Image (cartoon, rainbow, N blue to C red):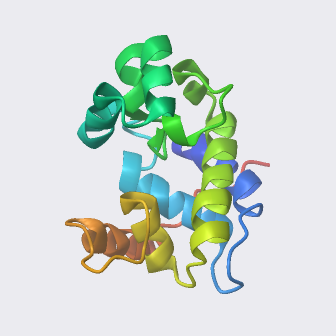
Amino acid sequence: MVERSDLARACRAWGGMLWLPPAIDGPRLLWAIAGCESSFGANCAQREEPYYQKLAESGANEQLTDLFKKFGSAAWSSFGPWQELLVNCSPAMTPHDFVNVNRAAMEVVSFINRRILAEQRPSTLEEIAVAYNAGKWRWLTTPPGAERYAEECRKYYDTEPLPAAAV
């Protein structure tokens, strides 16, 4: 669990580092994704992701296979307020590092910048949300749940205020 005030502080500190279109506020985007992924820090427990487990066990993804040798099932798990997959993080990241909300925020910002914004070039909050949830936003058929995820992300972005900053 991460306190909402600590999560909001991390969103404010790291959200400005996102390479977003001008109409999207970085701290609010991080806040909305945390709402979707962990109920704003209430559920940060390790979550195993079955699709990534199949990749790791099949040997189809060398990076996942290597992570499995080091960390077991954590290789195909997501962690922290943004439920970031270990495989999407820097090689130095360990499952334990996700307890540090700022380290987790740094990793999620790096992932969104590198794999979503730079590579896929989404232009709306909904496209970013679909890419975060489903791997990419340009699908012939949007994966089940991705549209609902984008709607929830938009709702949180528009209606869930970040807690006030501590002075």
- Residue positioned 49% across, 22% down in the render: 67
Q: Residue at x 50, y 21 (%)?
A: 66
19 to the left or right of 133: right
Q: Position of residue 1 (x, y in %)?
A: 45, 31
Residue 124 x %, y %: 53, 83
Left or right: 138 as drawn, with respect to 116? left
Could one spot residue 72 in this view of the protein?
yes
Q: Quadrant of residue 136?
A: bottom left
Q: Nearer the viewer, residue 109 or 158?
A: 109
Does 112 appear above or below 126? above
Q: Residue at x 76, y 64 (%)?
A: 16
Asked whether residue 1 appears in the rendered view, the answer is: no
Closer to the camera, 32 or 147?
147
Q: Position of residue 167 (x, y in %)?
A: 80, 49
Q: Position of residue 155 (x, y in %)?
A: 38, 75
Of 32 and 74, nearer the camera is 74
Q: Residue at x 24, y 78 (%)?
A: 141
Please state the total of marks drawn on the protein image.
0
